[in-house]
Amino acid sequence: MDRYRQRCAYLAMHIERATGSPTVDHFVPKSADWRLVYEWTNYRLAAHCVNAKKGVLDVVDPFVVRDGWFALDLATLEVVRGPKAPKKQHARIERTRALLNLRPCVAQRAEYIGLYRERIIPLAHLEARAPFIASELRRQGALAPGDA
């Protein structure tokens, strides 16, 4: 929890009540390689809703994601494939998007953006709790006045 700053490895968001309690995901599923069950390098902190749906899906490892692989559609608050997503990762990215766009995850993004736009939380708080959202607002020129 401390190492991840209580952020879901997949969502890059603080694990709040809406997304469920923190869980440990075995990135390589136990059913695929039981030898990795107790390997720290195979663990990812995940919001319960994401971990419960991931199962054995072949998704993008959050540890290898680079800037631009994912983007945020500010109209729908859904995560989309980013402009720098490598073609060889497109199928995995699409499977990952299915997890990232679960209803509670989109709702949590809406709450963060709403609180930020209403100036209830400052940009620094948003950057700490939801760095992907903050970076997308910055990249898309959608920061609140005075935060640019």
Image (cartoon, rainbow, N blue to C red):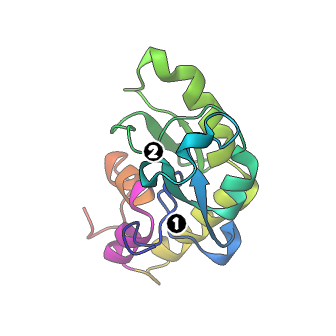
Residue denoted by label 2: 62
Q: Is residue 53 left or right of residue 99?
A: right
Residue at coordinates 65% horizontally, 33% vertically from top-left? Answer: 32
Q: Splitting the image into 4 quarters, where does residue 73 fall? A: top right
Q: Is residue 65 left or right of residue 14?
A: left
For the record, the magenta segment spans 122-132
Residue denoted by label 1: 113
Q: Is residue 137 left or right of residue 59?
A: left
Q: Main secondary structure of the magenta part?
A: helix
Q: Is residue 136 above or below residue 128?
A: above
Q: Is residue 140 above or below residue 143?
A: above
Which percent across, then down, holds residue 31? 70, 38
> Are the residues at dot 2 and dot 1 in contact (C-beta closer than 8 Å)?
no
- If the image is split into quadrants, where does the C terminus sit? bottom left
Other residues around mark 1 within 10 Å, as few (<14) / some (14–19) / many (≥20): many
Q: Secondary structure at mark 1?
A: helix
